[in-house]
Image (cartoon, grey):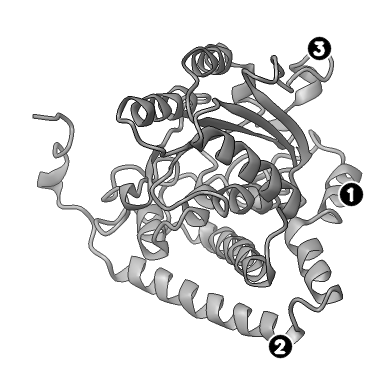
Amino acid sequence: MNPGVEKKKEMFYAMLRIRRIQERIESCYLQDEMKTPVHLYIGQEAIAVGVCSALKKDDYISSNHRSHGHYLAKGGDLRALIAELHCKKEGCSKGYGGSMHLVDTSIGHLGSSSIVGGGIPIGTGLALASKMNGGQRVSAVFFGDGAADEGVLYESINFAMLKTLPAVYILENNHWSVCSHVSARKAGDNIFHQALPDLLMSRKIDGNNILAVYQAALEAIERARRGSGPSFLECETYRILGHAGCESQDPEGYRDCAEVKAWKKKCPVDNFREQLLKEKTMTPAEITAMEIKIEIEIDDAFAFARKSPLPAGRELENHLFCE
């Protein structure tokens, strides 16, 4: 089902907002006010927004170290995100987690994991909890091609098929796990996970095409919600910046400059903007207004983070155990 005009505008705004937030984080990172490592989402925005636009507010998501896009696309609070990057008490994890451990339970995001593949069984468990509670909450599980090397992915998918769980596994294949290309880790093009169609819906799609992502996600989510079981979506995309930190911190030599340049031309934000302008869904003035609104919100979030207090030393041992 193709989204209507307003839905397209909402999705473009969400993508543009994530991109501008990531760019601001990247530009400020070397000022050393953000003490946590950051793994930026530039180039992959269509996946988080495409999937989360098809979810309901109370549906679950499970995320990884490259988590900003998922958190924001699902509706996470921007002020709380930027405060968390500054390790402040007002952060979404109270300053305890940093960039790789974002959480906002109010929108179904129970926390991202820095362990490669660590969010996959958590997301599967959330789908199991939904089914056991008799609800219709779907669990969307985001992970990268590095996590696809982990055995827990296949254990989780097998369990989800066995129990007919409402889970959607979203592989963001950006081709690189730190500095290791997928071709150095896989014998052939075998990340794509397939099974009998009645057990697992599988799609391999262009992860830079937000409409393709949205349509595949909507189909998978509706399948999960009606009790027909899990799905697997491989979204091919590209990590424009390095594994972690800002662009200047990316090691040289492990990627071909021509490869990076070619993928920049496939930018999901730029291409969707051009599409919307061409089909007259949006005007240049509307996009300019969006840019201004986003800039004001980002300025506010950074100002909020900088003036927020650090956690008190006496709070260091809080939240370690559950009574």
- C-alpha distance separating marks 3 and 2: 49 Å
Mark linked to residue 285: 2
Residue under label 1, please give it: 262
Three-letter code, disc 3: Ala
For numbered disc 1, what is the local secondary structure?
helix
Tell whether 284 sits left or right of 317.
Answer: right
Tell whether 79 sits left or right of 156.
Answer: left
Q: How many numbered discs, if any?
A: 3
Measured as percent of width and height from the top left, residue 43 is found at 71, 51
Looking at the image, is mark 3 or mark 1 earlier in the sequence?
A: 3
Measured as percent of width and height from the top left, residue 114 is found at 46, 32
For numbered disc 2, what is the local secondary structure?
helix
| Along the line of sight, the residue nearer the viewer: 195 or 261 | 195
For numbered disc 3, what is the local secondary structure?
loop
Looking at the image, is mark 2 or mark 1 earlier in the sequence?
A: 1
User: Which residue is at the far front?
Assistant: 226
Tell whether 138 sits left or right of 79.
Answer: right
Mark 2 vs mark 1, foreground winner is: 2
Mark 3 vs mark 2, foreground winner is: 2
Tell whether 298 sits left or right of 130.
Answer: right
Three-letter code, disc 1: Ala
Mark linked to residue 187: 3
| Along the line of sight, the residue nearer the viewer: 258 or 271 | 271
Circles 3, 1 touching at the beta carbon (< 8 Å): no
- C-alpha distance separating marks 2 and 1: 29 Å
Mark 3 burial class by Cα count in 10 Å: few <14, some 14-19, many 20+: few
Mark 1 burial class by Cα count in 10 Å: few <14, some 14-19, many 20+: few
Residue at position x 73%, y 48% from top? Answer: 240
Measured as percent of width and height from the top left, residue 83 is found at 35, 59
Is residue 107 in view from this perspective? yes
Locate residue 300: give its quadrant: bottom left
Residue at position x 27%, y 66% from top? Answer: 308
